[in-house]
Image (cartoon, rainbow, N blue to C red):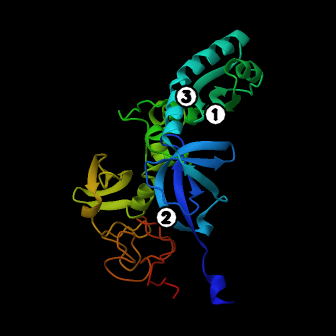
Amino acid sequence: MSVTSTLEKIVTIVGIRFRPAGRIYYFDPQGASYSTGQYVIVETSRGVEAGRVVIASKKLAERELSDPLKPVLRLANEDELRMMLSFKTKEKEALVQCAQQVQQHNLPMKLVETEYTFDGSRLTFYFTADERVDSLVRDLAATFRTRIELRQIGARDQAKLQGGVGMCGKTLCCSSWISDFGVVSIKMAKEQDLPLNPSKISGVCGRLLCCLSYENDNYIQAKQNMPQVGALLDTPGGQGKVVSINVPKESVDVMLESGVIIQVPVNDQVSGGVCGSCDSKGGCSRGGCGSGAGGCSKGGGGCSKGGGGCGSCGIGQGKASGSRTLQD
């Protein structure tokens, strides 16, 4: 294989955004240089549109592109910017007129927002509905005398377009900075020990909070270095069992034999733990107690009674890093 064939092809791109907090699309600047904040006219799959440069001209490996690059036609001039602002002021009025048409036709749809292209060649109505609604297009085209597009969106997109304030008291993440919706699952709420109450873990859109995914990886990583629920630990107050984990406080709640629950910082817990097979305090007398790293603090090998494993870390059959079982 030749050296030239192994070299990656590098292309120059600019990042364009068509809506605030919307997705960033890459375009080919065709040799021109554009700065952030400038408005440009670009060719898209939906026609010619105006967008704002959010990523200045830069080089990128072609393999990082998901779609072929469309060209940037030119920098928007003053007349085009005035035209864009003029049509922008007409969007609310268009939304009111469309709502009247919806009411007259008694259609099962909820209008969310209206958007003109920079030159008024297309008018897009965003709406939510349980089924498709196409009977309105002809009437709207006759009213506004331009190309009409009805775009059905979901609950998350509705919240993104309309904006609002979340339960945290801040502007919705989706309407302020999130460009693409990530995957959010109920498993993330369980991982973070959150109450599985829909009113507590759902956003204004009625779907799971996007912020559930922000710290999920940190919780998973932190829990790997903490005793698991059910592990036996020696504490200053005596032997106890871990009943819950508090990742933000880096502590565990331990229930003592007396039934009292105490909070023990992870860094302060006794390093030995208790072996679930031989009940040796301070760690298994000969082997892999889970409280120590790679083996019990009192020695190597397996559990002194054979079989089983450490109740603190669940190491099966007395095996740990660098240790041997009794059969060896």
CA–CA distance between discs 3 and 2? 32 Å
Circle 3 is placed at which residue position? 87
Q: Nearer the viewer, mark 3 or mark 2?
A: 3
The disc placed on residue 153 is 1
Considering depth in this image, is 15 or 6 the residue closer to the camera?
15
CA–CA distance between discs 3 and 1? 23 Å
Q: Secondary structure at mark 2?
A: strand
Circle 2 is placed at which residue position? 58
* Residue beneath the point at 59% across and 65% down: 64
Q: Secondary structure at mark 3?
A: helix
Q: Are marks 1 and 2 in contact (CB under 8 Å)?
A: no
Q: Quadrant where the N terminus lies?
A: bottom right
* Residue beneath the point at 58% across and 27% down: 114
Res. 281 image quadrant? bottom left
Relative to 305, say whether 195 is above or below: above
Is any part of residue 76 visible from this angle?
yes
